[in-house]
Amino acid sequence: MAKLAVLALLALLGSVACQTGGYGYGGGSPTPPITYPQPSYGGPPAAGGLRVGYYDYKCPGAEYVVRKVVGYKDAGVKAGLVRLFFHDCFVQGCDASVLLDPTPANAEPEKVGIPNLTLRGFEVIDEAKAALEARCPGVVSCADIVAFAGRDASYFHSGRAIDFDVPAGRYDGRVSHKNETIPNLPPPFADVDRLKQMFAAKGLDTVDMVALSGAHSIGRSQCSSFADRVPPPSGATTSGSDMDADLAASLRRQCTTPSDTVAQDAVTPDALDNQYYKNVMSRQVLFRSDAALTTAADTMGLVRASAYFPGWWNAKFAEAMVKMGAVAVKTAANGEIRKQCRFTNY
Ligand code: HEM
Ligand SMILES: *[C@@H]1O[C@H](CO)[C@@H](O)[C@H](O)[C@H]1NC(C)=O
Ligand SMILES: CC(=O)N[C@H]1CO[C@H](CO)[C@@H](O)[C@@H]1O
């Protein structure tokens, strides 16, 4: 019971934390002044010299430009932007290495790696970058744009319930290799120990890992990504997984080819909310990695807390996004401010 009281308190704190630091402007109104309250999360000091309000003087309104570009996109692309931030940060740090196109000098960047095949949102980053280059050339890094866009997509997808300040000042990397995607990005068949390990390798703990997994309450997945749990109709008749039978049947109907896509969260497909955790508990999730959160006592406790206390999860998600955004960030010493997000400057 004491435990429950603590959780309730945390939930309360969480919902308060989420109400501070909001921008609170509407889509079509003229550019309001942007204020940057101090971060309301209790995370560690941002690494790599990142700072909230980094562009206040260097490029006033920069964050507003990104938010506006993101705001006009459809729900699917917005979901893609949340995932893009994750994939950027887990491979070579949050340095926009995920954005680099193949070139004669580097024919196999991260983008052509298997986990990246279904990434989307690149053109949104290009659009924001073009607008920012017109406004203040050579100032705003692609890595910061990816981080702002991930935050803004979360904001819109959560009906503005999740909003947080993103410390900025990342530089863009020059290194991007396809062979570094699979070793760094957790696969959908990962078990709970592997998930913990792969997040820990990035300085993210189990609370961060479970909180960030809630991103699977938006967006879509190709049927090939959970084929191990729902074999195609022509294949085996039992999936051999613990997936809810109704969901499995529905997925089998929706999946006629491996590249068909389905909603990750069948209940509230376009809301970034704690429904994901309810789905985990009722075995209505797509991946083995989602279902794996029920297999350890600590992750299961966090799943329950997130399912019961939405305000608490909102705050933990925001905190973990900020922490993820500090993974191995580059500085002027080992990075650059790219002119175009798809290419390094030289
Ligand atoms: C915990 C380990 C994780 C695994 C194993 C994993 C795996 C996957 C897979 C396999 C897909 C579907 C890709 C496809 O078939 O098209 C997916 C989609 C997605 N993931 Fe994750 N993911 C993980 C963590 C995260 C994190 C930390 C975030 C962000 C904070 C995230 C955000 C998303 C989003 C938003 C989508 C939907 C993308 C879209 O609709 O375009 N995932 N994930
Ligand atoms: C990936 O490939 C690049 C060059 O193709 C190489 O320099 C790098 O060491 C490789 N990394 C790993 C982890 O194998
Ligand atoms: C989104 C994206 O750029 N995906 C690329 C992944 O890699 C293949 C090649 O292996 C490209 O054709 C895709 O465009």
Image (spheres, rainbow, N blue to C red):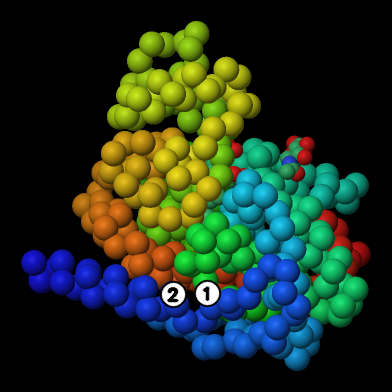
Assign the C terminus to one quadrant of the image: bottom right
Q: Residue shown at 59%/87% (left/top)?
A: 36
**262 to 322, vertically: above or below:** above
Residue 18: which numbered mark, if any? 2
Q: Residue shown at 76%/56% (left/top)?
A: 124
Number of labelled discs? 2
**102 to 224, vertically: above or below:** below
- Answer with the quadrant where ligand 3 appears in the image: top right
* Percent position of residue 179, x then y: 66, 45
Instruction: Look at the numbered discs 2 and 1 and tell me whether their residues touch, using CB distance below 8 Å.
Output: yes
* Quadrant housing residue 131: bottom right
- Secondary-structure class at tag 2: helix
- Secondary-structure class at tag 1: loop
Q: Residue shown at 52%/81% (left/top)?
A: 21
Residue at the outermost top position: 234
* Percent position of residue 318, x then y: 47, 69
Residue 129: which numbered mark, if any? none
Is residue 316 visible to the viewer in this orientation of the structure? no
* Percent position of residue 64, x then y: 71, 75
Q: Is residue 105 left or right of residue 321?
A: right
* Quadrant housing residue 142: bottom right
Amino acid type at circle 2 is Cys
Q: Residue shown at 35%/15% (left/top)?
A: 238
In this view, the residue in front, 282 or 29, is 29
Q: CA distance from mark 2 to mark 1?
A: 7 Å
Q: Is residue 20 left or right of residue 147?
A: left
* Quadrant housing residue 85: bottom right
Residue at the outermost left position: 1
Residue 164: which numbered mark, if any? 1
In this view, the residue in front, 170 or 308, is 308
Amino acid type at circle 1 is Phe
